[in-house]
Each structure stands twice: as structure tokens, then as C-alpha cells.
Amino acid sequence: MPIRVLIVDDHPVVRQGLRVLLEVQDGIEVAGEAGDGATALGLAAELSPDVILLDLKLPGLDGIAVLAELKSRTSGPGTSPARVLVLTSATEPASASLAVRSGASGVVYKDVDPDALVRAIRSVHDGHLLLAPEAVGSLVRSGGGWSQAAGLDALTNREREVLAEIAKGRSNREIARALAVSEKTVKAHVSSVLAKLGVQDRTQAALVAVRHEQGS
């Protein structure tokens, strides 16, 4: 099944460019387009896309309000919410932090390489949290409302296992062998763990794990 993407941006030229980019990708199809927040919410309910590519600066309901409404709609049992990838020109640390806390699965900036954007869509669809390196750096430097305790709570069971192995100082190859998965899978999990914890490398992630263990 292809990844069905809803494009949400108030600039028609941007929407058209994104549609052209995505329609030539294997395994991705454009489910629809919206130019404002209210239309985005309506199409999200009508089309049930897999991924929503969301700008934060929208007329009427902005991107944060859209995220909040989507989150409230999918808080019940048995729901399967769309993953939201924020594509924004707003580089303020607070914007990335607020988007993640409001339910975004990823944040990338509009100057992202087209191939990297396609990879980001596939990554959030696969369940990973994805932040542009600049966004991670901004969150770490500013604090940005980011809580490592909240980050730990956001880890999946598999990501917790990977973090435990990282804390033991094991390489991706050793972790892959221990968990009986591929190195590629481990690499994806490591990236997601670093993003969720708001840290920039494995050493910092290991320190978070150790401090948490000592405090529990």
C-alpha cells in the first residue's frame, strides 16, 4: 500500500512543487491538498491520510492548532492517527519544541533537500520521531520546553531496549546481534531515541539512561 500524504501549505506554488516531487516517488501518493487549517482538518477526517505534511503558518487555524485538534480526535482507543511531519520556515527553537509537544512526529525546514524530505516522510510513516539537526540543536541549546523525562516516556519498548544497549556501550552491530534485528533497523531506532531525548549523540543518550536508572 502506498503512503498517502496530505499536503497542507498556504502557498499554492509550494503545494504544487510538493505534489510534483511526491507523485514521482515509488510507494507515495498525494491524497489531497489544503491551504488553511480548517480545510486540512476536514480533509484529514475525510481522506484518512497516512502522513500529513503540515506548515505551521496557516490562515485561520495555524499549524499548532491543527496539531492540537488532530491529537484530540485520536486520543480514544482503537484509533490510528495520521503521522504529522511539520515542514516549516519558522526556525525559532520554540516553534519546533511546541510542534513536537503538540503531537508532530517530525520537524524539518523548508530548505531541506528534496530527497531528504522524501526520506523524512517514509521515516515518520514507519513510526520514528524525526527532527532536523538544526531543530535538535536548538532544542538542546535552549531547553525549548523539552523534557528528557517526557522523552523517555515517549520511547517505544524496542527503543528502550536499544537505549539500554547503548548505555552498555555497545555498537550498532552488537545491538543488532543482541536484539536479532538488522543494523539498519538499529540505526533508525538510535536516531529516534536521540531525537526523543533531545540529545545529539550516543554518549549523551547513555548518560540520560544512567541518570534515569539511578533516580528510579
Image: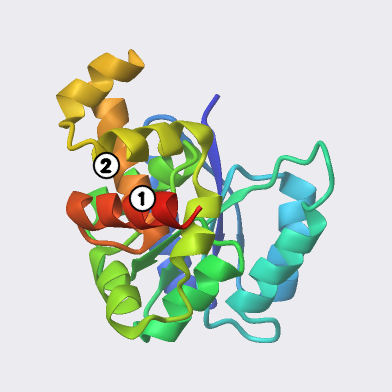
Left or right for 189, reference 67: left
* Marking on residue 167: 2
At mark 2, the secondary structure is helix
**Which class describes the residues within 10 Å of circle 2: few (<14), some (14-19), or many (20+)?**
some
Determine the image quadrant of residue 179.
Answer: top left
In this view of the protein, which residue sits in the foreground, 170 or 51?
Answer: 170
Residue 112 location (% of width, % of height): 26, 64
Residue 200: image location, x then y, percent: 22, 61
Q: x, y percentage for residue 177?
A: 24, 15
Residue 73 relative to residue 83: left or right:
right
Q: Is residue 152 left or right of residue 73?
A: left
Please name whichever residue, 115 or 189, is drawn nearer the observer in this view of the structure: 189
Q: Nearer the viewer, residue 36 or 146?
A: 146
Work out whether mark 1 precedes mark 2 in sequence or the reverse, and give the earlier one.
2
Above or below, comparing residue 82 to residue 12 in the picture: above
The answer to whether mark 1 and mark 2 are in CB contact below 8 A is: yes
Amino acid carrying label 2: it is Ala
From the top left corner, tell me how far across and down residue 196 is, in percent.
42, 56
- x 65%, y 67%: residue: 67
Spatial CA span between label 1 and label 2: 7 Å
The quadrant of the image that shows the N terminus is: top right
Left or right: where 181 falls relative to 153: left
Give the class, few, some or many, for how many residues have Cα within 10 Å of label 1's Cα (few <14, many ≥20): many
Residue 206 in view, yes or no: yes
- Indicate the secondary structure of the residue bearing disc 1: helix
Instruction: Indicate the quadrant where residue 176 lies.
Output: top left
At label 1, which amino acid type do we have?
A: Ala
Q: Is residue 112 above or below residue 22?
A: below
Q: Which residue is mark 1?
A: 209
Q: Residue at x 58, y 81 (%)?
A: 58
